[in-house]
Amino acid sequence: MSQPDTKQRILDAAERLFATDGFHATSMRMITGQAAVNLAAINYHFGSKEELLAAVIDRRLVPLNAERNRLLEQELESARRQARPPSVRQLVRAMVAPTVALRGQGEGPEHFITLVGRILADPQGIGRDLFLERMGPFISRLFEAMRQALPHLDPGLLFWRLHFSIGALSHVMRCHDRHLRLPMPFDPSLPPEELIETLLDFIEAGLEAKP
């Protein structure tokens, strides 16, 4: 098997360190050490630590958002052809399914999930701003699609329900493995496909609840 190229090694090392130690606690020296490169290589490929963080986020988030947008447009097009409102469940699936599928795709995606949890909780906000800027277009499209699906809901109420839905998904992604440590008298683990459908049941019910 061929070794990852220099740029890939830098991205892998930065993703792992940003996830485990946090952006601010990770030094460029730590990244060069793990990637087995010199500082000039990072400067050449990325320019700065902030630009490196943006590249780490984009590597996973760009294809993830492309799949989310594909599924969203697929449901909107199906609704147009059938002259019906979009399905709330299918719209939520566009957000949930690609995200849950990210789990189990290897060590790198697992680090990315941890990293997203860290940067969203970071009060200094460098990574959070980068992440939310990239998520903004999809969330806006999802909100407008939900307004078509649930036209009777006040936009402010729909905003909060969608906000809660995103929070439920984020919680599942960050805490998925930790629930197994709880002293339950049964095994709460679910295969990915069943986890997706169970989460969809929960979010769909909340979005469609009578005001």
Image (cartoon, helix red, strand yellow):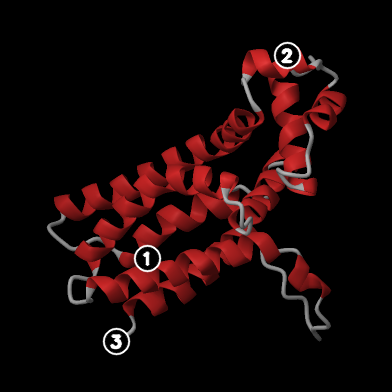
On the rendered image, what quadrant is the C terminus found in? bottom left
On the rendered image, what quadrant is the N terminus found in? top right
**In the figure, 172 relative to 48: above or below?**
below
Residue at point 71%, 47% (across, down): 110
How much space separates mark 1 and mark 3, taking CA atoms?
16 Å
Q: Amino acid at mark 2?
A: Ala
How much space separates mark 2 and mark 1, taking CA atoms?
46 Å
Name the residue carrying label 3. 210
Q: Amino acid at mark 3?
A: Lys
As drawn, the residue found furthest toward the left would be: 83
Local SS, label 1: helix
Residue at point 25%, 57% (across, down): 144
How much space separates mark 3 and mark 2, taking CA atoms?
56 Å
**In the figure, 151 relative to 55: above or below?**
below
Q: Earlier in the sequence, mark 1 or mark 3?
A: 1
The x and y percentages for residue 71 are 37, 47
Q: Nearer the viewer, residue 210 or 13?
A: 13
